[in-house]
Image (cartoon, rainbow, N blue to C red):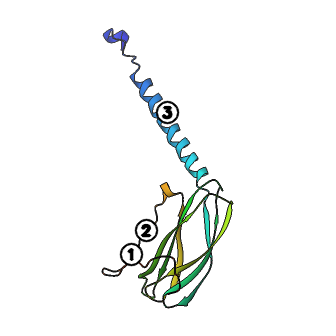
Amino acid sequence: MQERYGLNHRGRSGVVITVIVAVAFLAAVAFAGVMMVRDNIRHELVVWTVVAPDRADATFTVERDGADEVVCVLRAQDSKRIDVGYVEIDIPPGDDNVTIDYSLRTVAPAYAVEVLACERPDELRGPGPQFPPGIAIPDQPWTPS
C-alpha cells in the first residue's frame, strides 16, 4: 500500500490484540490446571444399613489434605426416590484419611443412602434437600428417644 497510496498502515493493533488473546488463553489454562490439582477430595460410601424405620446408619471414608475442612452431604431416599433423610456433615481439619460413622434420622424407612458430595465449605455445590411439600427435614443426628 505504501507504493500505491503512500500510506503505511502497519499498525500495532493486530500485535496488541494477539498478545492480549494469548495472555488470556494462558491465564485460563493456568487457572484450570490449578483447579484440577486442588480438587483432591475423594469419598466412598463403605456400607449403609436401615436400623429402624426412622434411622439409617452409614459408614463412609474421606480422603483429603488433612489441613482442609470438608463438608459431606449424606442423603437417604425411599423406594420412590423421595428424600427421607438429609444432612451436611462438617469434618474439621485433621487426618488425611477419615472414616465417618453416622446415624441418619429419617422420616420413613430408607431404600437408598448415598454420599452426594464432599467438598470444602466454600466449594460445596451438591443438591439441597428435596423433601415433598409439608415434610420437615428431620433433626440430625439420630438419637434414641
Q: Quadrant of the N terminus?
A: top left
Q: Quadrant of residue 129?
A: bottom left
Name the residue that disc number 3 marks: 23
Image mark count: 3
Camera-nearest residue between 2 and 50: 50
Residue drawn at point x = 43 percent, y = 25 percent: 16
Q: CA distance from mark 3 to mark 1?
A: 43 Å
Q: Residues within 10 Å of mark 2 (few under 14, many from 20)?
A: few
Please name the amino acid that badge 1 sits on: Gln
The image's mark for residue 130 is: 1
Q: Residues within 10 Å of mark 1 (few under 14, many from 20)?
A: some
Instruction: Name the front one of labels 3 and 1.
Output: 1
Residue drawn at point x = 36 percent, y = 79 percent: 136
Q: CA distance from mark 2 to mark 3?
A: 36 Å
Q: Quadrant of residue 13?
A: top left
Please name the amino acid that badge 2 sits on: Pro
Residue 132 lies left or right of residue 103; in this view the side is left
Q: Earlier in the sequence, mark 3 or mark 1?
A: 3
Please name the amino acid that badge 3 sits on: Val
Dot 2: element: loop
- Residue 56, image x, y percentages: 54, 84
Instruction: Name the front one of labels 2 and 3.
Output: 2
Does residue 15 lie above or below 139 as drawn?
above
Does residue 29 lie above or below 91 as drawn?
above
- Residue 105, image x, y percentages: 49, 81
Dot 3: element: helix
- Residue 122, image x, y percentages: 48, 54
Name the residue that disc number 2 marks: 127
Q: Earlier in the sequence, mark 2 or mark 3?
A: 3
Does residue 107 lie above or below 36 as drawn?
below
Residue 95 lies left or right of residue 77; in this view the side is right
Q: Residues within 10 Å of mark 3 (few under 14, many from 20)?
A: few
